[in-house]
Image: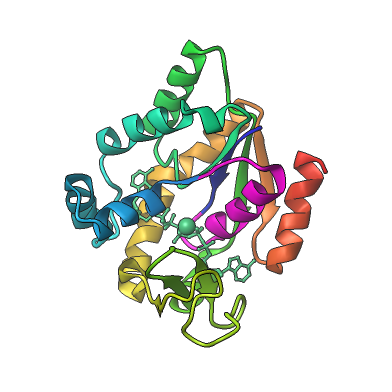
Amino acid sequence: MKIIMLGAPGAGKGTQAKKIAAKYDIPHISTGDIFRANIKSGTDLGKKAKTFMDQGLLVPDELVVDLVVDRVGQDDCSKGYVLDGFPRTIPQAEALDAALAKVDQKMDYAINVEVPDENIIQRMSGRRACVDCGATYHIVYAPTKKEGICDNCGGSLILRDDDKPETVQKRLGVYHEQTQPLIEYYTDKNILVEVDGTIDINDVFTEIVKVLGE
Ligand code: AP5
Ligand code: MG
């Protein structure tokens, strides 16, 4: 099962992708997480990506496409995978389709998690991420057992650099301009699934499972 998560920044792509990966036992591939791990370890890719990410802009397609195409070709992806944050532009989607076509494959579902802009800014200001393992929480909607401490690994929680309200606003603009056209792209390919992302986290997942199957 090969799945793409679509949706605005903060719509809940990562939250749902993790649940999908656990239930169907497939890898969760988040380009944002890959970039953040590279920033943390100080690689060249991380340094390049950071300059764009901090401004709320997309990292250029050429820095993303090969990375994802290589990743989905690895052995653990043979049963499928869930892509979170990729593709984000029409050229990225076309490059992915072309790479898959070469090995006689195609994506099965593009799940669009719909959340209006009004809800996003408020949601992002409450998000906290673990500095060590990258797990994400929300101070109201998905709190940790102990305040400020990751349930998963005990690391400390921070507000992501790009979650400041002015950067979130910028990311939303970039989303509408460059990523939203993918909804039509995948509608035309007959693989688009729409889910309401404003309801409770577990109810969103129930809606997704109805589509993907038990
Ligand atoms: P990325 O990390 O992908 O960020 P994003 O798309 O902006 O999405 P987020 O991770 O912010 O949100 P999400 O939808 O995963 O929401 P989450 O589940 O955390 O990318 C970061 C940057 O990297 C980009 O800006 C770009 O620069 C670069 N980049 C990455 N991929 C790229 C690519 N392919 N091409 C070019 N550049 C790329 O949920 C948000 C919060 O809400 C959490 O606190 C969560 O607990 C809470 N929440 C989730 N669901 C619900 C719910 N149903 N109800 C209430 N609260 C909820
Ligand atoms: Mg995410």
Residue 56 in the figure: left or right of residue 12: left
Residue plotted at (53% across, 52% down): 7
Q: Quadrant of the C terminus?
A: top right
Is residue 92 found left or right of 188 in the rendered image?
left
Image height of 76 relative to 163, above or below:
above
Which image quarter is the N terminus in? top right
Q: Is residue 185 above or below residue 125?
A: above
Magenta span contains residue 25 = yes
Q: Residue 91: x, y in percent?
A: 37, 30
Give the residue displayed 66% in from the left and 50% down from the top.
22
Residue 24 falls within the magenta-colored stretch: yes
The region drawn magenta spans 8-28
Q: How many marks?
A: 0
When asked about the image quadrant of residue 167, the answer is: bottom left
Q: Is residue 76 above or below residue 145?
A: above
Looking at this view, is 134 or 191 the one in front? 134
Which residue is at a point 43% across and 71% down the rendered structure image?
Answer: 130
- Residue 213 placed where, x, y %? 81, 40
* Nearer-the-camera pick, 40 or 108: 40
Query: What colour scheme governs how the chains and residues are painted in the rendered image of this protein?
Result: rainbow
Residue 79 percent location from the top left of the image? 63, 29
Q: Position of residue 127 (x, y in %)?
A: 48, 74
For the point 25% across and 40% down, the residue is 60
In the image, residue 169 sits, relative to residue 108, either above or below, namely below
Q: Residue furthest bottom?
A: 147
